[in-house]
Image (tube, rainbow, N blue to C red):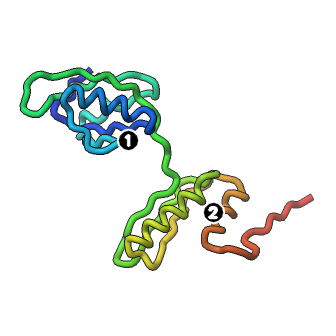
Amino acid sequence: MPTLAGLGVLVTRPESQAGALAHQLTRLGATVYRLPALEIVARPPHARALRGVAGSKVKLTVLRGNTTDPHVVELTREALPASEVRGRIAAPGVGYVRVAAIGATTPAQLRTTVAELSRAGATKLLIDVRRTSTGTLEQGVALARVFVAKGTLAVRETKG
């Protein structure tokens, strides 16, 4: 396994686990800036060494400040939750929202993203649902209801 010294890593944990990890890293002399995520940036080609199957372990070497005394921290890999909705300001006043998948929580994620973009100055929105083939008809209608409060949005017809 390659040694990852002097690099950064993004470590995420549910809030219930973040405190213990932060305490362990602080005890080793690392500075914890934010919980529940500790922002440390991995750079290629070493970033591949951090990837792996959820549940498998990876050992990181942590260097504290100017010291040459490295400490090894063992972490358990976890699957990152897929974010179904992401947004950004694409141009002045224009928000871009990518809906990568449609599921039960997508409408709530869309509302949150749209609210954040509005606070950031978006007055127009571009909603990108290209290559989004997941979800049920009901979930798609619920997603559309974020923008269209009432009225017919879809009609399902069957033959036979």
Residue 102: x %, y % from top left? 60, 54
Residue 20: x %, y % from top left? 36, 29
Q: Is residue 157 left or right of residue 6?
A: right
Question: Residue drawn at (50%, 62%), measured in percent from left and top?
Answer: 112
Task: Classify mark 2: residues with Cα within 10 Å, few (<14), some (14-19) or many (20+).
Answer: many
Question: Residue drawn at (74%, 69%), measured in percent from left and top?
Answer: 154
Above-or-below relation of 58 to 141: above
Hey, what amino acid is under mark 2?
Leu
Give SS at disc 1.
loop
Q: Is residue 131 left or right of residue 154?
A: left
Classify residue 45 by image quadrant: top left
Quadrant for the N terminus in the image: top left
Quadrant for the C terminus in the image: bottom right
Residue nearer the viewer, 45 or 68: 68
Residue 36 marker: 1
Classify residue 31 by image quadrant: top left
Circle 2 residue:
143
Question: Residue drawn at (67%, 62%), measured in percent from left and top?
Answer: 142
Residue 75: x %, y % from top left? 35, 25
Hey, what amino acid is under mark 1?
Pro
